[in-house]
Image (cartoon, rainbow, N blue to C red):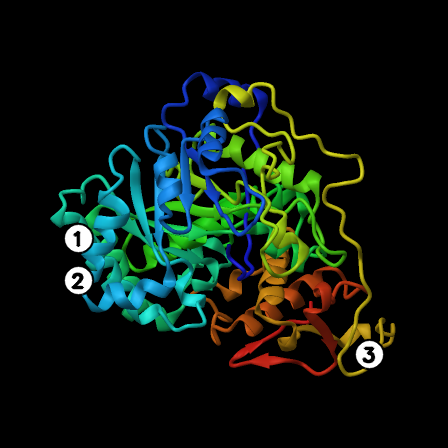
Amino acid sequence: MAMARRHVTLLCCSLLLLLSVLASHSDAGSVGVNYGRIADNLPSAYKVAALIKSQGLERVKVFDSDPAVLRALSGSGIKVTVDLPNELLSSAAKTQMFATNWVQRNVVAYHPNTQIEAIAVGNEVFVDTHNTTKYLIAAMKNIHTALVKFNLASDIKVSSPIALSALQNSYPSSAGSFRPELVEPVFKPMLDFLRQTGSYLMVNAYPYFAYESNADVISLDYALFRQNPGVVDAGSNLRYFSLFDAQIDAVFAAMSALKYDDIEMVVSETGWPSKGDENEVGASLENAAAYNGNLVRRILTGGGTPLRPKADLTVYLFALFNEDRKNGPTSERNYGLFFPNEKKVYDIPFTVEGLKNYHDHQSPVSGNQHETSPVTSPDTGTGDVSKTMTGNTWCVANGEAGKEKLQAALDFACGEGGADCHQIQPGSTCYDPNTLEAHASFAFNSYYQKKARGAGTCYFGGAAYVVSQPPKYGKCELPMS
């Protein structure tokens, strides 16, 4: 599962729209599930296959190619994505024989009785600490060559799941771009490969991470696909009603910037934990049920994203079970839709039929509740700005807050916060220097000035602070009103 933390969103539908789409859902997306097995108390693979089928889930993605699992899925009609683990990338890249033998043992031996539809070559390779990125493209090509050899290339696609940390810019969505150091060596050849083979880009997206780290600036309703006023993309003027859609469109925009508008996308992982440690804000049963239930409704009722209206998505929920042997915080062991005894952790539908009676049960105290925090200056450590000072002050980004917190705060300021962010769009006066800290400073200051420099309006969860000297970034001067 992606440990790099990012943002996400969803459109809310009226009952009338929902019912009309339920009547004709042939063009809608598809929902699958990730079947992780880092646990010592899970049911047998045959019981799991029966469980998946009984829930109406159409697809399953596994993180290896375990024979017991592939045999159990034989004859089920469930479409399967298998994984070539990161530790095998170098071998698959260096020799065609290794890739061919792997495909023969792990794919040919089971397909088509086990309906394998895709091979994920590695997982979040760019954040793998073992420096496997350099092997990715060659490994993908060798695996595909092996499929060609066995006449399976038209049946089985080859791709590789990326984390949203592969993006350099994600706000606004229309300005999405990939990290520059990955464009030439990885993304261009990967997207060329996906185009030539008719495959799609796999993306892991977790709105929870963005909300958990920045609950003071990100609307919970926006993260959970609930009713909210939406966020307008200053670059495209499109309005987003969910963080999920905004994140996905940032990736679409990044592909479009490289002239790959024709490549489709599959969301290979997304989910929300039902339990967490005390400091893991938002990890709760209610929020997990809302996120996944509303996501299923958003996917199965059809319609693409604001940027790609016709892009019906296939989405894999993470994960099938709570996995008791996973390391890390409590949330890591509580992403499951089911307990190991096969009982649901919370009751949500996975089919169009089940959606007819589904309602997101929101408690009276949940929703978009932001606390206003006092201004904190790294220089003074105080929580307030004196009234004699507020007539001549500016709000700037705290570079030590970290990229994720700055990005989330920037998203809020330019979106729900109503800051004027037109000047930091490409080609505008304050686009250069094109750095997160400079752009965030411009947005934070716009918000601060619009709020009459009131106490608590230059905080952003610790991502900003007040200065009394006119700040300047390149040729861009921050206005005082």
- Asked whether the viewer can see residue 236, the reply is no
- Label 3 sits on residue: 381
Mark with earlier residue (1, 2) = 2
The reply to whether callout 1 and callout 2 are in contact (CB within 8 Å) is yes
Q: CA distance from mark 1 to mark 2?
A: 8 Å
Left or right: 135 with respect to 313? left
Image disc number at residue 398:
none
Specify the amino acid type for callout 1: Ala
Q: Residue at x 49, y 38 (%)?
A: 44
**Which residue is farthest right?**
387
- Which quarter of the picture shows residue 113? top left
Mark 2: which amino acid? Gln
Q: CA distance from mark 1 to mark 3?
A: 62 Å
Marks 2 & 3, CB-CB < 8 Å contact:
no
Query: Which residue is disc 1 drawn over?
Result: 146
Give amino acid for label 3. Answer: Gly
Name the front one of labels 2 and 3. 2
Numbered tag placed on residue 96 in the rendering: 2
Determine the secondary structure under disc 2: helix
Q: Number of numbered discs present?
A: 3
Q: Image quadrant of residue 135?
A: bottom left
Q: Nearer the viewer, residue 229 or 118?
A: 118
Residue 303 lies, with reference to residue 445, above or below; the image says: above
- Say if mark 1 contacts mark 3, CB within 8 Å: no
Q: Where does the image place residue 272, in percent across and percent down from the top left?
A: 60, 46
> Considering only vertical position in the picture, is 347 above or below 208?
above
**Rendered residue at 69%/71% (across/down):** 464
Marks 2 and 3 sit apart, C-alpha to C-alpha, by 60 Å
- Label 1 Cα crowd, 10 Å radius (few <14 / some 14-19 / many 20+): many
Q: Position of residue 136 (x, y in %)?
A: 30, 64
Q: Earlier in the sequence, mark 2 or mark 3?
A: 2
